[in-house]
Image (cartoon, rainbow, N blue to C red):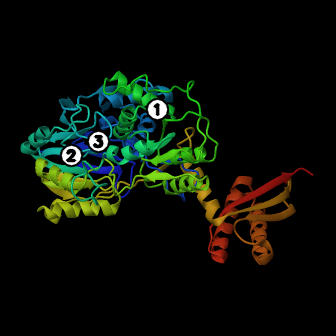
Amino acid sequence: MDQVRIFALGGLDENGKNMYVVEVNEAIFIIEAGLKYPDTGQLGVEFIIPDFSYLIENKDRIKGIFITHAHDDVIAALPYLLKQINIPVYTGALTASILHETLKKEGIKDVKIHRMKRTSRQVIGGVKVRTFPMTHAFPDNFGIAINTDQGYIVYTGEFIVDYDMLQEEYLCDLNELSDIGKKGVLCLLSESQGVEQSGHTAPRHRITSLIEPIFEASTSRILISCYSQSLFRIIEIIELAKKQNRRIFFHDKGIRDLLKHLETMKYYRVPKDMLISEKEFSDDMEDVVVLVSGIGKNLFRTMTNIANHEDKYVSFRTSDTIIVASPIVSGTELDANNMENEIYKEGGKIFTLSSKTVLSMHPSVEDLKMMLYLFRPKYYIPVKGEYRHLFMNANLAMSVGYSADRIVVLENGQIATFENKVLKSVAEHIELEDTLIDGKENWDVTGVVLKDREVLSTDGVMIIGVGVNFKTKKVINGPDVQTRGLIYLKDAEHIIKEVGNIMEECINTAVEEKRYENLTVRGEARDKIVRYLLKETGKRPMVLPVIIEINE
């Protein structure tokens, strides 16, 4: 029988950075390649992507990567992966169109992007693969079923069950799910982010009924914020503006481009007489809707700029009606709070949609139960979410009759191995380290740079400068010791004196033993000084010894 291995390179015990791997014998299939946003303590980090080391080492075995939709948590790390390995990409029509443009901007060429139908059957790398349509905030979303002689490995992707969803590009086909279940599912990987919510997510994901009274009551301009990738919600806002006979201005170029993709695919078209172009828009316009969109914390920063009168297009007025239709997600809390503070300082009033009232388009308890009922898997692996979400998802499976030995809660890098339709082991583990991204260039070395920033922010820096004779290497100047963020010099003269002594001793010893080399001596001094400072202060600062050789 086929040997099957399943593991995650990201997405477990965290929000975002999703990347899952299914190995069928020697064939490797990757599912998703997303990013996550950093904690507030990760200074200067723009975002974090998975560790690709295992994939690079085994690149010849990779048969393809599946991208279920175009949200950042499943696609934004893909360009970084494709710069390292050229592998075929399988995705939906809309996502393929967006990805083609992204790769062109990044200068990535010769990547094969296969446009998959939401319901399809094909053979990839000698393995049968099925896709099935799922409802999510982004059109063309689908799940994946990889066939093995042990049964299907099913990945649901992000989804909700909404019986009122009639548009073809959003529709979920429960018959397809049931058919896969009848043929036999070895393992189901199902997302966990909405597991704390009871009932079904639908219809609580819709916002029209909540914001329509605000639109009707407003006699002036409406500013409404929404994540640019929440297409379903953005279309709700556009439709409501149309109903209220209000014209609309899209503040962000990204959403204007996204809507062009939708129009090209014939999924949705904004009436041209509603649109206000950049050239036509004026900040003194009334009775219009300004849709402010963006990604992650940048959305809230844009709203803060508007409140502070620092935005290119829009300057806040106290008569404005402000609606925050974007939930506060992990990593954006500080920026969201700053936005509210600045608006209130300017005398503004905000209508915020509560995350308890309006749900994001992730499965609640009854949605997850339906997947278990339709697929009837032998084993269940909760994915996508913090550990508490994975744990609650596991408990949900137990509540519908699954025994603990049929539920597998993994960590990133932990491998579940299946043989003869039985889970054989979860002992094997791949060592992983997050890749920290700071801007676009030289991303492969920024992990070191950003760790240095963290050291500087917590333990400070010490610089030890010494001048030596170029010929004899005898110390003629210094040592001069300077610190920042470590100790107060006047209260620690004995430490400064001892650090200078260690520096001189390292130089003199190397000269006496006839092995002096500038870089080597500095390294020795650094190691000894770090150990001494750790013993004396309990801190491990960045230590920078400098030896200047002077030709007298």
Q: Is residue 88 visible?
A: no
- In this rendering, which labeled residue sits more in front, label 1 or label 2? 1
Q: Are marks 1 and 2 in contact (CB under 8 Å)?
A: no
Depth check, front residue: 263 or 323: 323
- In-image side of 517 versus 307 (left or right): right
Mark identifier at residue 248: 1
- In this rendering, which labeled residue sits more in front, label 3 or label 1? 1
Question: Label 1 is placed on what type of residue?
Answer: Ile
Q: Position of residue 325 (x, y in %)?
A: 42, 47
User: Which residue is most to the right?
Assistant: 552
Identify whether 419 is placed above or below 183: below
Label 1, secondary structure: give it: strand
Question: Label 2 is placed on what type of residue?
Answer: Val
Depth check, front residue: 535 or 99: 99
Depth check, front residue: 344 or 123: 344
Q: Position of residue 244 (x, y in %)?
A: 39, 35
Label 2, secondary structure: give it: loop
- In-image side of 131 versus 548 (left or right): left
Question: Label 3 is placed on what type of residue?
Answer: His
Mark identifier at residue 136: 3
| Pointer 1 local density, CA inside 10 Å: few below 14, some 14–19, many at least 20 | many
Identify whether 93 is placed above or below 287: above
Identify whether 302 is placed above or below 382: above
Query: Disc 3 versus disc 2: distance between alpha carbons?
Result: 9 Å
Q: Toward which corner of the image does residue 88 lie, by quadrant?
A: top left
**What residue is pinned by disc 2?**
161
